[in-house]
Amino acid sequence: MSEQVKMIGSHVRVTLGLNQSSQRTKSRLNENGSLGFIVSDIISSHKSLGGRSAVLLRSVAMSSDGSAWFGWIPINEIEIIPWEQE
């Protein structure tokens, strides 16, 4: 978990993991991840996600009202990759 804690505050790209991802996770990544995410927090057990480890993401892309999306995603459903400018 210590390597993951170092990611807090980092700009990252999030992709679907090798494990099966829920429709919820797929939708959140597709709808909000065009410019990547900022890792806001990481916890070892999230009650609403069945006790799984989770990451709190904030979208870099803003919605039409100027707000960012925030949400918890189960870590076992995704891959987190450092953002690289293309």
Image (spheres, rainbow, N blue to C red):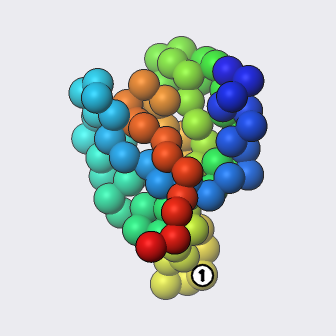
* Residue at screen point 60% across, 81% down: 66
Image quadrant containing the C terminus: bottom left
The residue labelled by disc 1 is 66
Up the image or down, 67 lies above or below 53; here it is below
Up the image or down, 85 lies above or below 52; here it is below
Q: Is residue 18 visible?
A: yes
**SS at badge 1:** loop
- Residue 77 picture quarter: top left
- Residue 3 picture quarter: top right
Q: Count neighbours of disc 1 (C-alpha within 10 A) and say few if under 14, some if 14 to 19, many if 20 or more.
A: few
* Residue at screen point 33% across, 34% down: 17
- Amino acid type at circle 1 is Gly
Residue 11 in the image: state x and y as whole percent.
62, 58
Give the side of residue 82 with respect to residue 8, left or right: left
Residue 10 in the image: state x and y as whole percent.
68, 52
* Residue at screen point 49% across, 84% down: 64
